[in-house]
Image: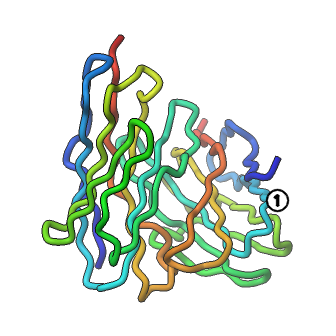
Amino acid sequence: AQKVTQAQTEISVVEKEDVTLDCVYETRDTTYYLFWYKQPPSGELVFLIRRNSFDEQNEISGRYSWNFQKSTSSFNFTITASQVVDSAVYFCALSEYSGGGADGLTFGKGTHLIIQP
Amino acid sequence: DGGITQSPKYLFRKEGQNVTLSCEQNLNHDAMYWYRQDPGQGLRLIYYSQIVNDFQKGDIAEGYSVSREKKESFPLTVTSAQKNPTAFYLCASSIQRMAKNIQYFGAGTRLSVL
């Protein structure tokens, strides 16, 4: 069965520091999709990025970047020059192709990121 | 604006009572999902539906029921059989029930037991 592990329960940094959120996944499928979501205090999950298992290119979007490494089954998320508005819980999630999405998304337990001014 | 609307934002349940959480979407999505989130935990799938009048159990369906009479609506009923209903409930939708499709979420309903 698929599994997502976010070992960092909580991270606290001072504004403008860089911070990396770790995500390790387990799956027996060769085709799968990885996602990152942000959950601000309001509670709604906000989609950040999707990556399929055949695309190992790193991606950068503004201050956000993602490092996907199949060799280590990791999909880490880095925020550069963090800001107070980045404070939120961040979830990594996995969806397997063979399940057709039938199992929905398998989520990690989330990392609570606190950016101190 | 297109999106997913969940109501109410807060809900209280008395012992032995059934309560229904509303989820409406105007994104014209076929697939809809219900997740439960407990403090410090990830989201767990309760039920999902890929088309009108069809729905399937997720990992933790016991004590819950759903219906899908309209494409736009996917209400969740928390029955008295659910012994630990206090949680944050999130509804999501995607274009179709496929692994690659992005799921978009509502703002959630926080359910507490009186």
For label 1, the crowd category at 10 Å Cα-Cα, with few meaning under 14, some 14 to 19 and many 20 or more, is some
Q: Is residue A24 left or right of residue B87?
A: left
Measured from the top left, where is residue B49 in percent x and y?
66, 76
Quarter of the picture containing the C terminus of chain A is top left
Identify the residue at image location x=38%, y=41%: A64
Residue B13, given in percent of the width and then of the height, sits at 66, 43
Q: Residue furthest left?
A: A72
Farthest residue to the top: give it. A117
- Between A85 and B70, the residue placed more toward the observer is A85
Question: Measured along the vertical axis of the image, is residue B18 above or below residue A14?
Answer: below
Residue A16 in percent (x, y) is at 31, 20
Write down the residue under mark 1: B26
Left or right of A57 on screen, residue A69: left
| Left-right relation of B84 to A63 | right
Say what amino acid the circle numbered 1 marks: Asn
Q: Position of residue A51 (x, y in %)?
A: 40, 66
Considering depth in this image, is B35 or A60 the residue closer to the camera? A60
Q: Quadrant of the N terminus of chain A?
A: bottom left
User: Is A34 on the left-hand or right-hand side of A71?
Assistant: right
Tag 1 subunit: B
